[in-house]
Image (cartoon, rainbow, N blue to C red):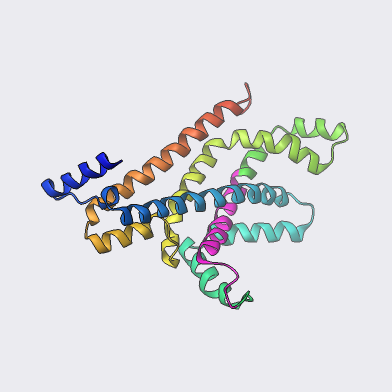
Amino acid sequence: MDDVAAWFLWLHRTTGVKLTIFYDAYDRTRFVEGLVTTVKLSAYCLVLSLALGAVAAWLVGSRVAVVRGAINGFIQLFRNTPPLVQLYFFYFAAGPVLPKIGGMPLLSSFGWAVVSLTLLETAFAAEIFRAGIEAVPKAMVEAAESLGYSRAQIYRKIVLPLAVRVTMPAMTNNLVNLVKTTTLAYAIAVPELVYMSAQVWSEQVNVPEMMVVLLISYVTIVGLINQFMQWLEARLRVPGFGQ
């Protein structure tokens, strides 16, 4: 590690390329903290939005008109309004009216980012799951009904597993968009990757270098997600279904 730091320090002294995150402990700590926060924010929103999206897709087919209307309204609201406006609404409008605990806000900026981005991605995930559900052959559902399965059991054991397999490519794109959308958390001072990098380049005046580092960081994160999703898609593939 010391050799790497010494090399980047030499690079700066000889060429002017100022990558302080490699040889300055304080800057490196801030950058790593931002990277960890971005990964955590993405992971929380990913898991929650997939779970809630699956539930929302199921409720879209509810026999109760009020439930169907409420879910469809939720999907249209979050799909057709700007993500930054949604984030500002939760943080600046919803946050102040909630009760405080010990004089402290109920949710931090990170918490509101999780809430806002999760609901946004839930709306998209619900539509992706719905498309997958419609691709499941009706004969499978009718066969399950004839065996006495309830609607919930059919959805959980037959329809959803098959729908997931059909929607893997679209879901991969959605997850990639989720990672890119986490940069909006900068607007409410969540210490994610862009926010912490901005602190570094504001003090060190090394904007071009940090922009390159940011680009490489996000390409790496997105690349890892794509590789994992392709591996998962191959493992879940059912011969003759969704081909």
One can see residue 234 in this view: yes
One can see residue 243 in this view: no
> Where does residue 232 sit, x and y in percent of width and height?
56, 31
Question: Overall secondary structure of the magenta stretch?
Answer: helix
Can you name the residue that lies furthest to the front here?
A: 2
Identify which residue, 61 or 40, lies in the foreground: 40
> Where does residue 75 sit, x and y in percent of width and height?
61, 57
Q: Quadrant of residue 136?
A: top right
Placement of 159 over or under 37, stated as above or below: above
Placement of 107 over or under 221, stated as above or below: below
Q: Residue at x 51, y 45 (%)?
A: 175
Q: Residue at x 42, y 42 (%)?
A: 221
Q: Which residues are magenta?
A: 103-128
> Where does residue 115 sit, x and y in percent of width and height?
57, 60
Q: Residue at x 12, y 47 (%)?
A: 15
Identify which residue, 83 or 7, lies in the foreground: 7
Instruction: State yes or no: residue 116 in magenta.
Output: yes
Which quadrant does the C terminus fall into?
top right
Question: With 159 as the anchor, is 191 left or right in this view?
Answer: left
Identify which residue, 241 or 10, lies in the foreground: 10
Placement of 133 over or under 116, stated as above or below: above
> Where does residue 1 sit, x and y in percent of width and height?
31, 40
